[in-house]
Image: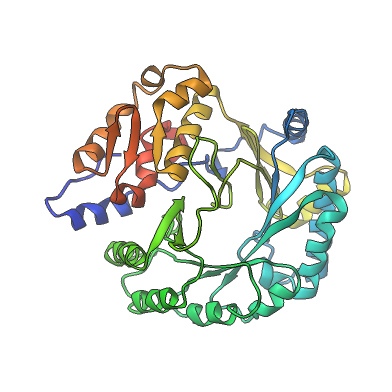
């Protein structure tokens, strides 16, 4: 995880941006084992149900590679069947605190069907009084934000695209009654001359949050210069990092409160005050219950057959080892709190911090030397530039296999 250190701070930051690991908070689905099946998932759910105070639930609905020839009603029926089976396995006191309609779902299901999907959730699962419902909408979608608000979505996240009027879509949502509007940036391409202009228009509209790019998908010719400039424009506009890639308008209260090592970025990349289990519903959807992960079938016919047989359709999964669990806890602290309290880690886990990470701690040395992080007693604190590079900081504590 080393990188060339240049005398120019900008050059070093830009080089580091492009070398960030893609999978640092969670193992990639490609590392899941096909030997992990339905019984393993049900065992994990049952164990989670028995917690004295069960964690809340976040539901993530997605399309996967559904294809354009699948009737929307048919896919909705499949999602509802999967929802029913998941609900049957969960204890009655589990509560849904949030729902995420992943990118593509709002285009795949007409608003009336989206409304039926959202209305079905409280029929099968208990929900908090006002669960968050985030809809992720491609900037090039022809769907009206008002249509999403009308069926129960409370938050709109517009996903930027070079050839689409993302700022205009965001503006349309202003009067639709959403509790919050987000704008998600992608890694800018070198040929995307309008990237900074779109961002400036977005900042003038002042949405509640702007999300910095994630390195999960890089264009053929990424512009790290514009990526860095976007971060600086956010800071100049008064936006403050609140965890992961989320930057919130500075005049709003931090929704997560002070960091205590228990905050968590879920599988949808959303920082939350408390850790919640994540149930993914859809083709190739990933879920996390405690330290157990799984992925459902990625073929619609096969998945539907599994559902008809009374199975959720688990195709692969894994269980974190104790070493991986400890590393994941540290990575989450760095992502969500931009700090790591070694003494608090020891108190929670009864494990000497320096011994636990003796082999990985040296990887921090070049980052500390750059001034991107510093030790304040036994607390590792990320500098402003380090917060931009939180993945690189967190990767210092992860096993190599977890950050491929």
Looking at the rendering, which quadrant does residue 156 occupy? bottom right
Residue at x 82% of width, y 48% of height: 126
Residue at x 65% of width, y 81% of height: 144
Quadrant that contains the N terminus: top left
Q: Give 225 or 233, whichever is nearer the viewer.
A: 233
Q: Position of residue 75 (x, y in %)?
A: 78, 63
Residue at x 63% of width, y 67% of height: 179
Answer above or below: position of 51 versus 127: above
Left or right for 170, reference 99: left
Q: How many dots with numbers?
A: 0
Q: Give 356 or 96, whichever is nearer the viewer.
A: 96
Quadrant that contains the C terminus: top left
Answer above or below: position of 171 versus 381: below
Q: Position of residue 3 (x, y in %)?
A: 24, 44
Q: Position of residue 141 (x, y in %)?
A: 59, 78
Residue 164 can be seen, yes or no: no
Q: Position of residue 334 (x, y in %)?
A: 42, 40
């Amino acid at each position: 995880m080393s990188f060339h250190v240049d005398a120019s701070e900008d050059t070093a930051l830009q080089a580091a941006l492009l070398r960030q690991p893609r999978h640092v908070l969670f193992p990639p689905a490609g590392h899941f084992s096909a030997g992990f099946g339905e019984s393993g998932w049900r065992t994990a759910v049952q164990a989670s149900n028995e917690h004295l105070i069960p964690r809340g639930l976040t539901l993530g609905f997605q399309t996967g590679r559904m294809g354009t020839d699948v009737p929307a009603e048919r896919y909705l029926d499949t999602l509802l069947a999967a929802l029913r089976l998941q609900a049957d396995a969960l204890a009655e006191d589990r509560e849904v605190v949030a729902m995420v309609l992943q990118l593509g779902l709002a285009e795949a299901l007409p608003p009336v069907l989206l409304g039926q999907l959202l209305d079905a959730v409280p029929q099968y699962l208990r929900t908090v009084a006002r669960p968050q419902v985030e809809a992720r909408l491609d900037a090039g979608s022809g769907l009206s934000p008002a249509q999403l608000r009308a069926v129960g979505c409370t938050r709109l996240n517009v996903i930027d695209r070079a050839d689409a009027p993302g700022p205009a879509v965001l503006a349309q949502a202003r009067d639709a009654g959403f509790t919050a509007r987000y704008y998600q940036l992608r890694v800018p391409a070198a040929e995307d001359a309008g990237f900074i202009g779109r961002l400036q228009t977005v900042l003038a509209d002042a949405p509640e949050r702007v999300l910095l790019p994630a390195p999960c998908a890089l264009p053929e010719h990424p512009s790290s210069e514009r990526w860095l400039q976007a971060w600086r424009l956010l800071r100049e506009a008064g936006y403050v990092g609140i965890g992961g890639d989320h930057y919130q308008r500075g005049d709003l209260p931090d929704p997560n409160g002070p960091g205590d090592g228990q905050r968590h970025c879920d599988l949808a990349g959303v920082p939350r005050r408390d850790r919640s289990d994540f149930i993914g519903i859809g083709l190739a959807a990933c879920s996390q219950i405690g330290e157990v992960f799984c992925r459902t079938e990625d073929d619609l016919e096969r998945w539907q057959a599994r559902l008809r047989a009374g199975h959720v359709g688990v195709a692969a999964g894994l269980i974190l080892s104790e070493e991986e669990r400890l590393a994941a806890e540290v990575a989450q602290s760095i992502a969500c709190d931009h700090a790591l309290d070694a003494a608090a880690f020891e108190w929670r886990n009864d494990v000497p911090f320096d011994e636990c990470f003796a082999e990985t701690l040296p990887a921090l040395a070049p980052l500390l030397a750059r001034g991107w992080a510093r030790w304040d007693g036994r607390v590792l604190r990320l500098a402003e530039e380090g917060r931009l590079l939180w993945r690189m900081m967190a990767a210092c504590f992860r096993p190599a296999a977890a950050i491929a």
